[in-house]
Amino acid sequence: MTDTLGYTKHPDGSWEPIKPLEKGYIYSAGMVTCSRCGKFIRSMGGPMEGCICVHCYIEDLRANKETD
């Protein structure tokens, strides 16, 4: 099982994994959802713009692989 919940895209085009929140910190109560399919990614730490779930990230990798 992986600790990656989804991915968020940086302005330079790179992707950063969204990990579970660490205990002992204070987080915002904004939910993080996939910008493509609307799937719930994380209940706290949002809002985050341009996030995608693991499923959509894998689908993008497959689509890009097929076009190469």
Image (cartoon, helix red, strand yellow):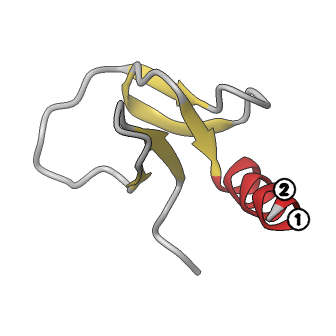
Q: Quadrant of residue 1?
A: bottom right
| Side of 66 relative to 3 (left or right) | right
Residue name at image x 49 percent, y 63 percent: 4
Q: Is residue 18 above or below residue 46?
A: below
Residue 19 in the image, given as x and y percentages of width and height: 38, 56
Residue 6 in the image, given as x and y percentages of width and height: 54, 50
Q: Secondary structure at mark 1?
A: helix
Residue name at image x 79 percent, y 65 percent: 68
Residue with the most extreme bottom position: 1
- Viewer-nearest residue: 64 or 42: 64
- Viewer-nearest residue: 60 or 5: 60
Residue name at image x 14 percent, y 32 percent: 26
Mark carried by residue 66? 1
Residue 9 in the image, given as x and y percentages of width and height: 45, 38
* Number of numbered discs on residues: 2
Q: Secondary structure at mark 2?
A: helix
The CA distance from mark 1 to mark 2 is 5 Å
Residue name at image x 53 percent, y 55 percent: 5
- Residue type at tag 1: Glu
Residue 66 in the image, given as x and y percentages of width and height: 88, 65
- Viewer-nearest residue: 34 or 40: 34
Q: Is residue 39 above or below residue 31?
A: below
Q: Is residue 28 above or below residue 43?
A: above
